[in-house]
Image (spheres, rainbow, N blue to C red):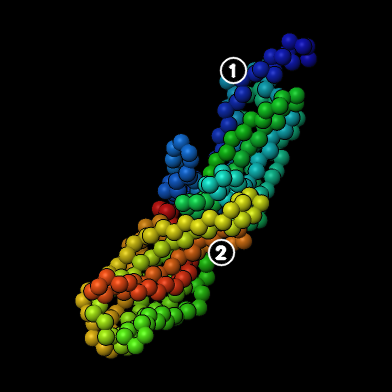
Amino acid sequence: MSFLQSLSNAFRSAPEISIHFNKADAKPITNNYILHNEEDLITLSGPIFSIGDDIDGRIVFNLKNANQDNPYKYESIRALCVGEVRAHNSGDNYIVSSQSTVVSHNGSFTESQTTFPFTFSNVDLTCESFTGEIFDIRWFVKVLVSRRGMSSTLTKQKMFVTQNITPEPQARPIVLQVGVDDCLHLDINLLNSRLRLNDIISGTIVFKINQLKLKSMQIQLERREALVPNEFNHENVIHTTKLGAIELMDGCPIKDISIPVRIHLSRFDDLTPSIIARYFTVRYHLNVTVIDEESRKYFKHTEIKLYRNEINYEH
């Protein structure tokens, strides 16, 4: 190859890259995940994968003005399947899963369109896609094209979504007790603290002793995200989001009265499964607040664990 041909190839217009998942052709696509960005919001659309799925598809290169005399040469084309946690405060990323494969090496593009298949098997998809206030969990396939003698690498990536169905755990009832000396004693009995995303919080509230002039009682659902210090995030960060509150009582109850509790989780937006990992967690809490006529407040809270029992193509 002459010097002029080498120079022409070095400055050859780069091909356009597109990534297509095979699964996207057969199953619905979700578009409700929003990735936070300092400048804008990005809608994430992609197929849904679960543990045990192969992540496969094709990479398409479109080259303008393709011809045999002036090919676009490359040293290697790699595809990566990556799951990462992105901390909003620092912008740093923590890789939770990664696979890499070489789809082609030492080749050239001479046609207007060239396609390479890719497949990732046995990918650890344990962490579900998540968009929070202090961190995101996101998954994507990334393509890297390296060229000999060129310092920059041509890249393209495409997001996908992970959701995992969890076997139904054994029910775990809990009892919360709210007491103020000998003036107030009430039991909050919840039939189960391990709930599906579309489940119902059920139970009763029983007043054992009540010598206070109570005005109201409400139960609030909160999501608590946490990042613990580690190599990608150097400070402890906790953020609590109030998802909604429901008034359970209005007025002063008498002794031994039983108030039923029945709250549909479907009324709360953006619920996700609970996430318990080494460096990051997503937990859900029920906060019960009792208010008397002098506006004094009495609190009690407990954690509930949420799990997914079906794939949701709308969230």
Where is 32 relative to 252, above or below? above
Residue 281 percent coordinates (x, y): 54, 61
- Crowd around label 1: few <14 · some 14–19 · many ≥20 (10 Å): few
| Picture quadrant where residue 13 is located | top right
Q: Residue at x 44, y 37 (%)?
A: 40
Disc 2 secondary structure class: strand
Q: Residue at x 50, y 61 (%)?
A: 282
Where is 198 relative to 174, above or below? above
Task: Report how far apart the C-alphas of labels 1 and 2 lie in the structure.
Answer: 52 Å
Where is 282 relative to 25, above or below? below
Whichever of labels 1 and 2 marks the residue nearer the N terminus, that label is 1
Disc 1 secondary structure class: loop
Q: Nearer the viewer, mark 1 or mark 2?
A: 2
Q: Residue at x 59, y 58 (%)?
A: 228
Residue with the mark numbered 1: 65
Residue 268 percent coordinates (x, y): 35, 61
Look at the image and tell me in which quarter the N terminus lies.
top right
In the rendered view, does 97 fall on the left or right side of 24?
right
Residue 157 percent coordinates (x, y): 57, 38
Is residue 303 in sight in this rendering? yes
Residue with the mark numbered 2: 276
Where is 108 relative to 167, above or below? above
The number of discs equals 2
The one nearer the camera, 116 or 258, is 258
Residues at circles 1 and 2 in contact by the CB criterion of under 8 Å = no
Look at the image and tell me in which quarter the C terminus lies.
bottom left
